[in-house]
Image (cartoon, grey):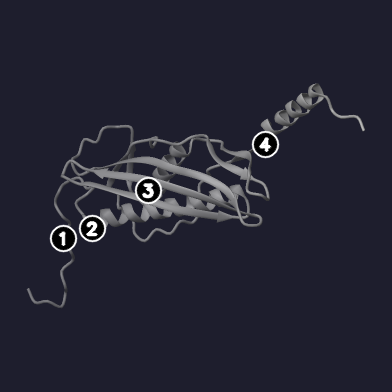
Amino acid sequence: MRRPTLFSLSLLLIGCAGVEGVKPIVQVEIREPSGLEIETEGKGREISVRIPFEGGLETCGMQKDSFYLDVGTVRCTDNPAAALADLLVKQLRKAGFKVQTGAIPTKPTTVQIEGELLLFFTEPVGKGGSETDVHLQLTARSGTGLDAERTFYEKGRGGDAQRSVNSGVRRILQTMLGAIIELMDDYPMLGRSSTAVPKKPSNPEQSP
């Protein structure tokens, strides 16, 4: 039997390296979810959101084979940090808040929100499933002394990369929206035209 020469072995190794170096790319979109649950209305209170959020890369995941080896890239069509900031602004407006972007707040009661995307990564898990991890930090400040910070982490799951991204985006937006609404409800003066706290309706059963 003829043994392979050193030259032929070198060609074989180069050929294998060339095939391995070409990895497929799967593209996913960060889409606006529908039907998010909103427990209360913004009632026209003012919020200023700095967009885009910091952080985020177009490459946002990986593909794996049956041995869980990296065989490809998952790429977001848009920067996740910018996309999530835009989607949060849309959801806040749908909730009834008056949202500014880019402008410097002129009222001390306006809540200023900044964000930083710490992680957005999708990868396959198990048999035919995919998970997307979303880790994001929000900071809320106002001229009246508010200075709050909160970190959010959600995991989306689905049958493929796009479905898990859809799930992760929906969960993180729902959580952030709920936290902002809770903050605004806990401090009724935030976002209003004046610092006066609205009076609660009197009990008609009480005597004057």
Disc 2 marks which amino acid? Answer: Asp
| Nearest to N terminus: mark 4 or mark 1 | 4
Instruction: Determine the residue positioned at 78% across, 24% down.
Output: 11
Name the amino acid, label 3. Answer: Leu
Report the residue marked by disc 2. 186
N-term mark: 1 or 3: 3
Q: Which mark is residue 92?
A: 3
Q: CA distance from mark 2 to mark 4?
A: 49 Å
Q: Residues within 10 Å of mark 3 (few under 14, many from 20)?
A: many
Eye-nearest disc, 2 or 4: 4
Mark 3 vs mark 2, foreground winner is 2
Q: Residue type at mark 4: give it.
A: Pro
- Determine whether 110 is above or below 183 in the image: above
- Is the residue marked by circle 4 packed among few (<14), some (14-19), or many (20+) residues within 10 Å? few
* Residue ID at (37%, 48%): 92
Give the residue displayed 45% in from the left and 36% down from the top. 56
Question: In the picture, which quadrant includes the C terminus?
Answer: bottom left
Which residue in the protein does label 4 denote? 24
Q: Residue furthest top?
A: 7
Q: Is residue 34 left or right of residue 136?
A: right
Q: Residue at the far left: name it.
A: 208
Q: Secondary structure at mark 3?
A: helix
Q: Which residue is mark 1?
A: 199
> Circle 2 — which element?
helix
- C-beta proximity under 8 Å, tags 1 and 3: no
Marked residue nearer the N-terminal end (4 or 3)? 4
Distance between the alpha carbons at the discs numbered 1 and 3? 24 Å
Disc 4 to disc 3, how far (Cα)? Answer: 37 Å
Of badges 1 and 3, nearer the viewer stands 3
Q: CA distance from mark 3 to mark 2?
A: 17 Å
- Which residue is at a point 16% across and 44% down the rendered structure image? 144
